[in-house]
Amino acid sequence: MSMNRFTFPALKLVAGALCLAAFAATAQDKAAPAPTAPPAAAPAAAATAPAPAAVKIDTLKRIRDTGAILIGVRESSVPFSFVDAQKQPQGYSVDLCLKVAEQIKSDLKMKNLEIKFVPVSSANRIPALLEGKIDLECGSTTNTRDRQKQVAFAYTTFVAGIKMLAMKSSNVNSVEDLRGKTIVVTVGTTSEKMMKQLNDERLLKLNIIESKDHNDSFKAIEDGKAVAFPMDDVLLYGLISKSKSPETFAVVGKYMSVEPYAIMMRKDEPQVERIVNRALVDLFQSGEIRKLYNKWFTTRDLTVPLNQYLKEAFLVPNAYPAWP
């Protein structure tokens, strides 16, 4: 397999108090050719903009015809999908998608399969998929009921939960501590939607700053422009681990949701879903998934214990959406 290195089912998640309490207890949380330019990423879209109509694409036929698969990656979703110091895509989700690409290469009996990494953001990842700019999205995307109306999700490969990042000196420990203050959200994320809903329901009178990616949201906290950044806890730990002064930040508050992450695909392509899920099941059953997990989540800078819901997902593969 040659790679174009980009320059830059069964058990349901339980709801309610049992879900949040149990989850909170466990979540402390090969020779490559010269680089070539990947297809342009889809332009950023406003979170409230209507979703584009899906272009009818036969993904496997296009891969056969072009000899390439287009994988959407993120720049700052550490440790799932990010760009390293050499501007190369890295991460847990990227590794999973490389395994999927190997399965596609084998099933299509292709001697060579070119992998083209395409940058996407929280805001444009779904349009990029629907418009055919990418074939798979390999980042930190939560499988939700609303998103399932537009796209398909593979089996769950990680389970996170929304908390808040804040400076330790801010004395922010709960959503109520945010009343009348400024927070920052990343556009196109489930946490953006949740915080806007909480703001309306609880009359919090928040000033909500919107940023295009997680790095910008984190910088707003660093620069004192916002007091809290609500996001999936594992991503917050990842951002802190990469900061210059990690000791000044904290991940605070109770879990506000349970977030199952999965590879995102176009709807109504059952053959693609079967190939992707078969590759994942092979990883789950062989135990290789544990090695990949340890590679990215048990490190000197970041340690995230394997929680009970992810253990279940590995034992009994499922594509259940987020709660609530």
Image (spheres, rainbow, N blue to C red):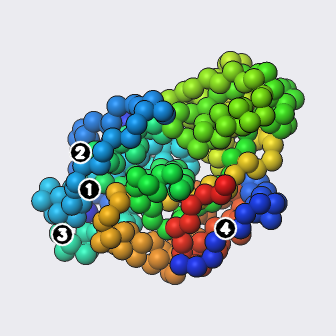
**Lower sequence index among marks 2 and 1:** 2
Q: Within the image, what quadrant is residue 22 found in?
A: bottom right
The residue pinned by badge 2 equals 34
Q: Nearer the viewer, mark 4 or mark 1?
A: 4
Q: Nearer the viewer, mark 2 or mark 4?
A: 4
Q: Within the image, what quadrant is residue 223 found in?
A: top right
Residue type marked 1? Ile
Q: Crowding at label 3, few (<14), some or many (≥20) Cα neighbours within 10 Å?
A: some
**Lower sequence index among marks 2 and 3:** 2
The residue pinned by badge 1 equals 69
**Lower sequence index among marks 3 and 4:** 4
The residue depicted at 64 percent of the width and 28 percent of the height is: 184
**Lower sequence index among marks 3 and 1:** 1
Element type at mark 2:
loop
Q: CA distance from mark 2 to mark 3?
A: 21 Å
Q: Nearer the viewer, mark 2 or mark 3?
A: 3
The answer to whether any part of residue 258 appears in the image is: yes
